[in-house]
Every structure is written in structure tokens, then in C-alpha cells.
Amino acid sequence: MRNKQINTVYLAILLFFAAFIIIPAVVIFTNAFNSSNGSLSFAAFQAVFSGNSLKTAFFNSCKVSVLSALITTVLAFVLAYTENFTNLPGPFKKILRTLAVFPMLLPTITYGFAIIYSFGKNGLITKITHHQFFDFYGFKGLVFGYVIYTLPISFTLIKNTMKYIDRRYLVVCKIMGDSSLKAFWTAILTPLLGTLAVSVVQSFFLSFTDFGIPASIGGTYDVVASLLYQTMLGSLPDFHQGAVIALVMLAPSIVSILLLNYLQRFNVRYNKITPMKMRKNVFRDAIWTLLSSIILVCMLSIFIVIFVAPFVKDWPNDLNFTWANLNSVLKDKQLIRVFNNSILTSFLTALFGTGLVYCSALVTSRSHLHPRASMVIEAIAQITNTIPGMVLGIAFLLTFKKTPLHTTMAIIVFCNMIHFFATPYLMMKATLDKMNASWETTAAILGDNWIKTVVRIITPNSKGTLLEVFCYLFINGMVTVSAVVFIAGARTMVITTKIQELQHFSKFNEIFILSLLILVTNLAIKTVKGIFNHSRKDY
């Protein structure tokens, strides 16, 4: 009975991934190699590679992504070092952690409009400083936007690794007479080299595949993401050429994942880590605090305009306070329906996505499944982590355009479940692996089957991680745009796709208010999670 239950769950998981990964992958490859009459053809490849559009866009994407990834990693290191290797008060470090990940609560397409309203000729920061710092359309704006987008992820990655650096090596370096710079290199930077390289690769991958920032401030600086969108949904859409460009976008993603796997061997692991306070050094703490404060101010200052522009009568001509713009949005039934769609799709994504993640982690960590069978799910997690959102959205569009799922809310939920599967799965699996391995054996001796054991024993001990997974999926469901822009219909449009539409009509007040609704919703979800975690600690 136990094996039958486990095999049933495993089979259901495989069928889901077969339907929403394997079949769409086959369809997108078929479209790339087929002609309009259905015969095998390389015409789409010839059309794409014969022109200069893809070459230019690919080179531009690589250039801007590499630069932003390097800048992001340096800035993220400064923030992580300030938290882990200074004696700043705990409340300040908590504020630093919170502010560093703030941009993750907003969609990337909003970053561009915030940059426009901050650094434009009539922008908020331009008016305050009486100086326009840079031309935000094109290369410079994309670098700035990508850094803001990838900094929270890079900071989290480096911070989590830095926590496990053994600080005793700093003491050893001092005893050996090493200079401060050499001690810094030997005891801190060297153990982090693998993680720093991973940060660069991960930031490059995220920047290369992002659609939201180029959609808002890309201007005439073509990147692969904007070229792919124009090919698929432009004035003259071509699904065959779009499939070819999608495959081109997939190539750097695969290389990135291979590099990430290779870089894991450079991670330094200590046999034992001894908790140890840093020695007092007011000058060191002041310098790193100043650097971190500058980074956070530069990153977060562009978002101030989101809280200002919608609440004045006519930016920048009439700066008198008003609720009229907010009331107008709240009375607009279409915009409220879009907001409700976002809430519903994010909730369903979080609900069913958590179920999928939990079941997948259970059959690989808490069952006697054959190792090769477990490797299939591990491989699926790697694949979903490789596929860019735009490629996934196009694959779903081509696969389900003539089915009842086309432009439904269900297809958005399924797409999000696939898109965001990898990270929560690894999170859930890590938690289940740490639990007592004998629980299932003891329960079986007492007569419980596998399902009862999961419900009565495993699940109650996994509540914290389950809530973490739910919040992760909900927040990402609220802010995602790259995949859903291809599969959302008129009735199932969500906030991020509506924002992308509103930019063509220059309705920035509506854009900022919708962005605020996303922010408030995500903050509410994080607050609920914080209250739950606090109550569990008290208990």
C-alpha cells in the first residue's frame, strides 16, 4: 500500500511535468524547424540569422548583462559584508536586510517607469538636485535597472554563504602577521570566490532574460528579450522566427546552469564553525556602513516617486496633494478586475504550486523511491531553473493556442507553477532531508500508511517551510511579467501585463497606483508570514 501511494503521487507529478514541459518543448522545437505549410524547413533560421537584428540584440544583451552582473556582485558583497563582519547594532542590520530585498516586491517593468519619473528632465531626483544625471533610455538605464533587479538575489546568495565563513581564520592571519588586506583576501574573499562567481552568472542570466526593464526603458537599444516580444506580438508576428529566437535565448541559460553546477565544487566547507564576535573597530564599521547606506539610498531613491507622483494633481506642473488619481483607479472596474485577477492567479499559483513542490520533495526525500526515479525530479528542477520566462510563455502560447486552456487563468497558474518550481523545491527538500529518517519506519510499525504519516507527522513539522514556499510563489506570481505577457487574455489580464499595456497610453498615474497595490499586497503576505514565524518561536 505504501509503495502504491508513493508511486501514484510520483506518476501524477511526472504527468504534470510531461504535459507542461515536455510537450511545450517539442512544440517550440517543431515551430522552429517547420515552415508555414508544416514541412521540415530551416527557413526561419535563415531569416533570423541572415539579418543583423539578432546579432545586434544578442551582443547588446551580453554587454549590458555582463556589466550589470559585475556591478551587482560588488555592491551585494558590500551589503553582505556590512551585515556579517561589522559590529553594527542588530536593528540596523535588520533594516539593511529588509531594504536590500525591497525591489523584489515590485515587478521589474515598474523599475523603468520609476527611473523615468526620477531621472527624467522633470523627474523627482532631477528637480531636487537641479541636475539630470544621465540619459536613462538605452544602455545606461538598462544597467541601472538590471542592477536594482538582481541586487536582492545576489545579496541573499552572498549573505547566506558569508554566514558560514569561520572567523577564526581572521585571528590566525593576524597571528601570522598578515596585513589587513592579505587577511581579508585569505579569510574572507578566498572562501567566497565560488559564491561570487555564482552571483555573476546568476545575475547575468536574470538580466539577459528579463523583459520588464527593456520594455519600459530599453528605447532603441535592442536586446534579445525585446526582439523576441516584437517578433511574437508585434505588428507582423512570426511564430516560426519567434521560436528560433526563443531557442537562441535558451542557449545562454543552459550555459549558465552548467557553469553554476561547475562552480559548486569551489564552495569551501568547514568541518566546524565557531561563533565569534568581530573585534571592535569603529573606523571599519563606519566605512562599511557609509558604503552600504550609499548603495541603499541610490537603489531605493528611484522608488520614492511611486509614492509621490500619483498623489499630486498634475506632475510636475501642479504638486498639490490629491486623492483623485487613487479614487479614479479604485472606481475603474476594469483595473479592479485586473487587480483581482492578479490576487486570484497568485493565490492559486501559491496553493497548487506549494502542493506540487511538497509532493515532489516528499517522494525524493521521504520515501524509498529508486534513486534513478528521484534523479528525474532533480533533473526537472534543473530544467525549470534553466528555462527563461519568455521562452516558457512562448512555448505555452504555441502549445495551447487552439485548446480550451488558451488565455484562461488556469494556463497562467500552470505556467507560474513551472516557472517558479526550482527554488521552492530545493528549499522544501532541504527541510525534509533534515528531519528524522526513522519517522516513517516507526509509523509503519504502528500501522500507519505513507499518506497518514505525511499528514500526521511530516506536515506539522514542515509548516514553516510550507508557508515560506507559499509566500515565495505568491509574491513571484504577483510580480512576474515575462511569461504571462504571452498567455494572458483580455479577461485574464493581470496587473503586470496591464502595466505593460498602459505605458503605450502614458498613463503613469495608473501604472504607479497598480504597482503600489502589488507592493501593499506583497507586504501584507510577508507580514502574515512574519507574524506566523514569530508565534512559532514564542511557542
Image (tube, rainbow, N blue to C red):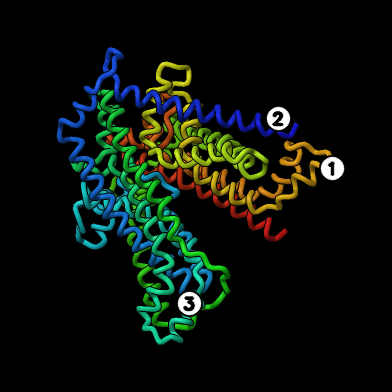
Rendering coords of residue 68 (x, y %): 29, 54
Q: Is residue 167 positioned above or below 177 on the image?
A: above
Task: Identify the residue under disc 2.
Answer: 4
Rendering coords of residue 420 (x, y %): 48, 40
Callouts 3 and 1 close, C-beta under 8 Å: no
Rendering coords of residue 4 (x, y %): 70, 30
Label 3, label 1: how far apart the Cα atoms are = 50 Å
Q: Find residue 174 and report its image quarter.
A: bottom left
Assign a secondary structure to mark 1: loop
Q: Residue at horizontal 32%, vertical 43%?
A: 252
Point out the tag, 2 or 1, that comes first from the N-terminus: 2
Query: Between 296 and 10, which is closer to the camera in this rendering?
Result: 10
How crowded pointer 1 is (Cα within 10 Å; few <14, some 14-19, many 20+) is rated as few
Res 308 visible? no
How crowded pointer 2 is (Cα within 10 Å; few <14, some 14-19, many 20+) is rated as few
Q: Is residue 62 positioned above or below 55 on the image?
A: below
Point out the tag, 2 or 3, that comes first from the N-terminus: 2
Rendering coords of residue 425 (x, y %): 55, 44
Label 2, label 1: how far apart the Cα atoms are = 19 Å
Q: Find residue 293 and report its image quarter.
A: bottom left
Q: What kind of residue is marked 1?
A: Leu
Task: Identify the residue under disc 1.
Answer: 446
Point out the tag, 3 or 1, that comes first from the N-terminus: 3
Assign a secondary structure to mark 3: helix
Label 2, label 3: how far apart the Cα atoms are = 52 Å
Res 268 visible? yes
Q: Residue at horizontal 71%, vertical 41%?
A: 454
What label does residue 169 carry, if any?
Answer: 3
Q: Is residue 163 positioned above or below 516 on the image?
A: below
Q: What kind of residue is marked 2?
A: Lys
The C terminus sits in image quarter: bottom right
